[in-house]
Image: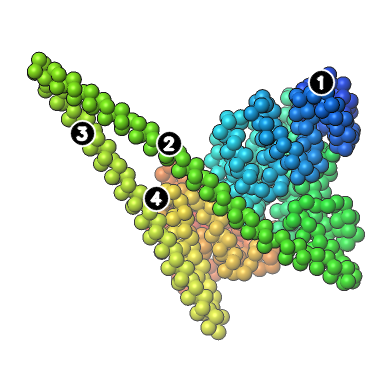
Amino acid sequence: MGAIRTAFFFMFVCTISAQESVSQDKDYFTEFQERPGAMERSVFFFKVQNRYNKNSAYDWLDSVNVYLNTAEKTNDSIGVVNYQLIQSQIYHDLGDYERSLAISKGLYNDFKLYNLETKTRILELMDTNYSKLELFDRQFEIRRKKRELGLTENITFYDIYANLGQYVKARNDYIIQEKNTIDEGDFFAKAIYNNNVGNYLRLDKSVPTALTVFKKANAFLDVYFNDILSVRTDEELVSANLLKGKILGNIGKCHVLQKEYEIAIPFLEESVAIIDEYSKGKFSSDFIENSLELADCYLQLKDYEKATDYLTEIDNPIKTANILKKNRLYAALYDRTGDYKTSTTYLKRNIRIRDSIDDKDAKIKKQQLTAIISQEAENSKNLIDEQKLELEKSRIDIIEKDKNISLVFISLVFTLLGFAGLVYAYLKSIKNQRLIAEQKHIIENSLIEKDSLLKEIHHRVKNNLQMVSSLLSLQTKNTRSKAAIAALEEGKSRVKAMALIHQKLYQNDDLSVIEMQGYIESLINSVQSVYKKGGHNINITIDAEGVELDIDRAIPFGLILNELVSNSFKYAFPNDEENGKIYIHLRKIGGKEGFFEYTDNGVGLPEDTEERANSSMGIRLMNRLANQLQTNLNTDRTSDGVRFWFNFK
């Protein structure tokens, strides 16, 4: 059996090595030049992913410029368009997005003259260039143009919202639009999906959950690579390896956010190596960002030589955030090595950049977000206007039909008296249907008004609870007793847990239930802020996706979880161990019964826990809350920490 596994592993390694070797050895530049015409060269160019494997993008640009000049001299209009498309893509690959956009916008002026494929490429180039230049309102307009022309399917906008800092909306829209479109056996698509979800979580500071999702994405991609029965094309291999580099980089970034620099370095170094290998000739913001993270890690670990090496490898970062970070790292490096003059120079650069760009960028993004929301509102208004026109047309048609029916009725009334009863019944039926429709409309409006009032009530309850929390904070500042301060802090944490329930309710479209995965994440962040303990060395795993509870069960559940997490942060890890773990599991069984489990690998419960139960307010509170859920809170002492669990209806 072991020999068979070894043989399969050897075959897999040989297959992957052979495929990558073929991809690296191909001379795409010569193949491009040997194509017979502009159309054939354009199709070949856009088909090949790893086109710069032997010749740089500048070599390709020089060759295309020669072809373009020849096409212009011979009035070859088709050739001019195709070579300008290639030219625009090469400038984009080099990171010169403004020049790339200028060429594609010039082509857009004659948009109606092109075939479907050319139109699609022009819009794709403008879309990606507007994104890189952070002109998101223009990018939104291009996406609308795509959807209007039907050039591409499933036009989405979640990435635009993410670039504007709306990470929660972006993640929710992405999950709704993409999750159900992925085939069960498409592991590459699953890797992309989990990497994007993890990115939105990381940007929204939900780092532990993001790290779990990134690891899942990496596992799916490993399954994709290990499928030795499928032969991958050169383009598929390049895309998969670039995705691997991005996922590893994202895992490394999560560890950096948790200040786990030594753990982050291997992931970031492997990521940089992969992206550098498979994005030859193309500008990569992931390469720059991950290199900056590596420089930061080595700087934190006081390995100034390696930090300097990575900083010097980064040439001309385009994004403002990357420029600021590079200057900040240089300033910190020179400060720690005693060159305070140079350190001050880099700090002054950042001050100038922030003064001239940051405020302006913030205002521009706010304006862009406002413009996008206005465009969406305008789209909705136009859609409503169109529906109104259709309804008005239908109403006129009905009126005309009613007139015709009346004329026929009058003309036949004296000759077809026996038919009069049937006509009367028919007209009365139409009237009843209209009355039913009007009553239905009134009921629907009433339900909408009721939902609005309920949301307002939950909003006000949340605000009142926040006021209570603020009062407790003020009382804490005016109290000298440590015991009183601790009690007030615990009370404030419990109030926040209840306020969060009402916040989630008025933010939801469905006011009857609360989505527990997001609530638990928010609750943990709230507890961390109360106890001033970031929990960077504690790995928190939350497994409650898809579980929804009504408010009667969510409030006692949230208060129980608040007590458990608070106790873990206060007592379970007194030495802030690096291997600290908290696991939260919540499931509905058969849609009726529920199961909750909470474990940590801390120091466990003291020996006199049972004697303290009657005097500890926290334990008494959890038992009473469990009674509200019609269950009992069970406690298991384990060899490594403690476990709490209960079933509930």
C-alpha gap between disc 2 and disc 3: 27 Å
Question: What residue sits right under mark 1 in the picture?
Answer: 37
Among the 4 quarters of the image, the one containing residue 482: bottom right
Of mark 2 and mark 4, the one earlier in the sequence is 2
Q: Quadrant of residue 338?
A: bottom right
Residue at point 62%, 69% (across, down): 532
Q: CA distance from mark 4 to mark 3?
A: 34 Å
Mark drawn on residue 512: 4
Nearest the eye: 20 or 57: 57
Q: Nearer the viewer, residue 280 or 515?
A: 280
Q: Secondary structure at mark 1?
A: loop
SS of the residue under disc 2: helix
Q: Residue at x 88, y 58 (%)?
A: 308
Does residue 584 show up? no
513 sits left or right of 321 in the view: left
Q: Nearer the viewer, mark 2 or mark 4?
A: 2
Mark 2 or 3, closer to the camera: 2
Label 3 sits on what residue type?
Asn
Judged by depth in the image, the label closer to the viewer, 4 or 1, is 1
